[in-house]
Amino acid sequence: MTPESRAEVGNTALYNLLQVTHPEFGIVPSPEGNRFNNYFTRDAMRSGMVVSERLDLESARLILPAIIKSQEVAISHIGVKTDPETGERKDLLPHEVHSKNSPQDRLIELEKDHPVRVNPDGSREMVTWFADDVNSLFRSNVANTGKALARFEGIDSQREYYLQRWPIVLRTLRHDIESGDIDGDGLIESMPKGK
């Protein structure tokens, strides 16, 4: 790949990601419609990783805050209990988050098959944890974000960021080891069916 084509790919990725940045969720799956005001951890973490490796200084200033905001949304909804209806498990990051600002018609539709919460004002919200790969994607995203911070803001910024994220990294790793090491050999396998 030529330097020019590499720059073009990076610019296209950045442009596309800027279209899906959102003040509440950081990175969302779509720039419009019923997917704009929703948050999907996998989509946000993967998008953030791809773009953070291609950033220049100016682009980093534009997109790193959205990547970090997406991580904060995931962290704020980390599982604290076991709930088979929502898929929540201790130390598992959420699969998706719909706030009262999310498209309500979509939540009314989801209400038929999913645990949608209806607030006293009639607005709906939903958080589910039905994705077993979000923790590992989160940890990879944290590693990439730290590398980008070191490149653009210096090693002290990276160190501070990693110190803030380390407790969550450990929680997600503990979850994956406890529920994903099926045969006890210390390696994390795919989740067994029914768990």
Image (tube, helix red, strand yellow):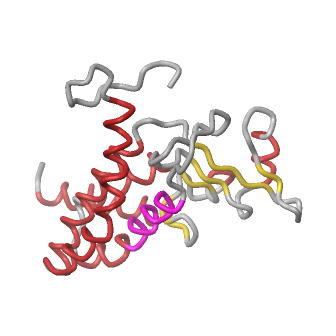
Total number of numbered labels?
0
Residue 46 makes an appearance in the image: no
Whether residue 108 appears in magenta in the rendering, the answer is no
* 111 sits left or right of 133 in the view: right
Image location (x, y in percent) of residue 156: 16, 81
* 147 sits left or right of 46 in the view: left
Residue found at x 56% / y 46%: 81
Q: Is residue 66 above or below residue 54?
A: below
Image location (x, y in percent) of residue 20: 51, 61
* 72 sits left or right of 32 in the view: left
Residue span colored magenta = 65-76
Residue found at x 12% / y 48%: 1
Classify residue 143 by image quadrant. bottom left
Whether residue 69 appears in magenta in the rendering, the answer is yes
Image location (x, y in percent) of residue 166: 28, 62
Residue found at x 70% / y 58%: 102
* 32 sits left or right of 193 in the view: right
Q: Is residue 89 above or below residue 157?
A: above
**Secondary structure of the magenta portion, mostly?**
helix
